[in-house]
Amino acid sequence: MKSISNKLASLLLMAGAWVGSAAHAVQDLPGGPAVNQLNLAPPVTRIAEEQHFLHWMMLIICTVIFVAVFSVMFYSIWKHRRSRGAQAANFHESVTVEVVWTVIPFIIVILMALPATKVLVAQKDTTNADLTIKTTGYQWKWGYDYIAGEGEGIGFISTLDSSHRVMSDSGKVQDAPPDYLLKVDNPMVVPVGKKVRIITTANDVIHAFMVPAFGIKQDAIPGFVRDTWFRAEKVGDYYGQCAELCGKEHAYMPIHVKVLTAEDYSAWVAEQKKKAAAKLDDPAKVWALDDILKRGEKVYAANCAACHQPNGKGAGPIKPLDGSAIVLDADHAKQIQVVLKGALNGAMPSWAQLSDTDIAAVVSYTKNAWSNKTGQLVQPAEIVAQRGK
């Protein structure tokens, strides 16, 4: 009996330690989810504030109606129960009662509909935007293209930080940071106090762009264009996620929006344009193998390792690249076409949005990484030639 109690005590201590460590690991994320959050995300746009007001107004009205109706019902049941000798009244077609229970609900619905309609109309008013960003959903990352306003011409892919994916795969998340599975390599950057129009579409399946603090959620549908907007009134970092079940990596498709002051945003735009100019590679350039492999390793880590694994072994239905016949084939066109057009009915997405040099680099890298020591080198000019086929 004593041994059983000792074992039980040990188990309770272990459980307490585990709960304590788990509770310690979980922290609030400013601009993102909070521990034990019961309310909507703290609003930083006028639309989000209006949504909060509507949420609580509707909840209060519905609660009052619920309490009133059930109070009258239970009082009537108790007061007029048979054991007290109550007799049911025999009447019908009371015009007064019918008018009351028609007019009062009508007035309530109108009072609820007017502010809701006002907010709904405001949500869809994307005119007179200061900045327009095309947001494209990919399996499983976001592409941002600044197509109007300050920063026009800037474009990049935003992907989950690779260290967070490694942490998730290992299952060792006890010391996970507050932005666990929300940290990205390239956040969307916008200026504070400016109207930002978001145009959504998708490259493969339906995604949804959602940032709770902004009060926005818009589906991104292949072949269609949808739009929404926000005006952030506070500088900071704000987080969201794809809100449409889009495949096995759905949980690894975060959104990070960084809101900067006007001065800091202008500085960011200038820096991005300098980087873009520096990365504007000449597709006719002939690369040395060592140089292109270094670049290819970075491209692979940012775009391919999530599915094919850093060791190239793949996982489940994801085919391995280490030892793959297509990767080892001396005919470069086979692998290039898979990268450009995808394969297996979209299970392998198209990566045509990458530059010619980046595709050449990552193909060269896979042909020489792990046990694939082929010595083969793919030049950007080969990618240019294959794009039109």
Image (tube, rainbow, N blue to C red):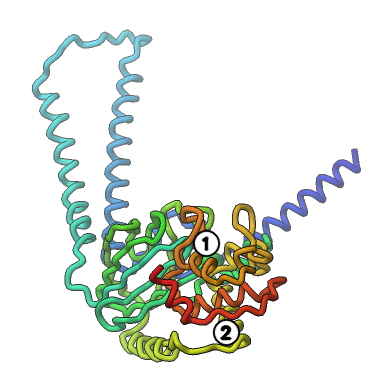
Residue 260: numbered disc:
none
Of tags 2 and 1, the one toward the viewer is 2
Residue 293 as seen in the image, left or right of residue 235: right
User: Is residue 82 or residue 145 the one in the foreground?
Assistant: 145
Residue occupying the point 71% across, 57% down: 18
Does any portion of residue 179 appear in the rendered image? no
Q: Which residue is mark 1?
A: 252
CA–CA distance in space, label 2 to label 1: 28 Å
Give the amino acid type for the residue marked by disc 1 in the picture. Tyr
Element type where label 1 sits in the image: helix
Element type where label 2 sits in the image: helix
Exactly how many numbered labels are in the figure? 2
Asked which quadrant contains residue 292, the reply is bottom right
Query: Eyeballing the image, is 72 above or below 130?
Result: above
Residue 269 as seen in the image, left or right of residue 345: left
Position in image of residue 68 (x %, y %): 29, 34
Residue at the front extreme, as displayed: 331
Q: Residues within 10 Å of mark 1 (few under 14, many from 20)?
A: many
